[in-house]
Amino acid sequence: MERKRAVRRVGVVVLAANLGLALVKGAVWLDTGSLALASEAVNSGADAIYSAVVVAGLYLTTQPPDFEHPHGHERIEPFVSLFVAAGVLAAGVGVAWSGVSSLLSGSYAAVPPLAAVVLGGGAAAKFALYRYCLRAGENHGSPALVAAAKDNRTDVLTALAALIGAGGAAVGYPVLDPIAALVVAGGVLLTGVDIVRDNVGYLVGAAPPEDLRVEIIEIALSHPEVRGAHDVVAHYVGPEVDVSLHIEVEGDMTVREAHDIETEIVESIRGLKEVDDAFVHVDPKELGEWKEGDDRWRDERVD
């Protein structure tokens, strides 16, 4: 419940912030006629639109399990992240196009002081949103919020590019504006690719980092009645991890005893923040089901 409320709250905050920035930038654009600020106002308006989609996606992904989705709706979240990535990539192409067009045409526009102040304030606000979304995304395991954080980081870069252009024009080097735009475009495009790379693994059931697998094995082997573990499989189901493994115990114990061991290990593995569910199969150690290459997971208590 805490994760659901937190994730939804962050989405609403980002939406409200982007709406506010779009209105402020639009108002100052109308007052100053700054083309740089007009571009930033359109960018913030587009951010507000995508933020609304993100809020809707986060609402769906935090719905409880139902008959059609017994493991919940978390698999929707990587698709929300890819939607954000598409917006970031489109922004990168737009910034690059603007920079190239300006260089080819030789038209460089100065930014009025009031517009520069608004751009600076907008960059500061976006940096605050970046830190806020990143912290919440990492704390609650939300790839959509991490993607939103990276998108806000690209907005900081675009605002700074506009300010560099303003500074260049002020000191007699207006060509710095399109050059800065091209540099920023490269960073924005790399951010989009980074978001895609982060989320494709969630969609195709990739394995989590090896240290998580090691931690799972250590949990299994820490039980005093477990003599070994093998056939360990951990993979992403959306942003969370499903685990299955076999444990080896003494073959003469009762079914009830084996069941109790299985339950304790399942609960311990499910207690890991990254894990959604765990499935444990109990084997008599005397059957010798050990597979080649699994010896590093074999407990030293095995005969």
Image (cartoon, grey):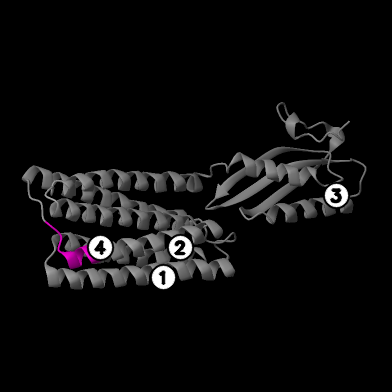
Foreground mark, 1 or 4?
4
Q: Secondary structure at mark 2?
A: helix
Q: Which residue is mark 4?
A: 119
Q: Amino acid at mark 4?
A: Leu
Foreground mark, 2 or 3?
2
Instruction: Report, in whole angstroms, how far the alpha carbon at label 3 lies from the one at label 1.
Output: 49 Å
Instruction: Give coordinates of residue 247: x percent, y percent.
Output: 78, 42
Asked whether, in this view, residue 154 is left or right of residue 39, the answer is right
Asked whether, in this view, residue 211 is left or right of residue 256, the answer is left
Residue 17 visible (yes or no): yes
Residue 93, compared with residue 139, is above or below; it is: above
In the figure, residue 282 lies in which quadrant?
top right
Which of the pair 269/106 is nearer the observer?
A: 106
Question: Which residue is pictured at 53% across the width and 42% down the height?
Answer: 206
Residue 258 badge: 3
Q: Which residue is mark 2?
A: 132
Span shown in magenta? 110-117
Counting residues from the N terminus, which is met first, the one under dot 3 or under dot 4? 4
Q: Is residue 136 magenta?
A: no
Instruction: Give coordinates of residue 148: x percent, y percent.
Output: 40, 58
Q: Secondary structure at mark 3?
A: helix
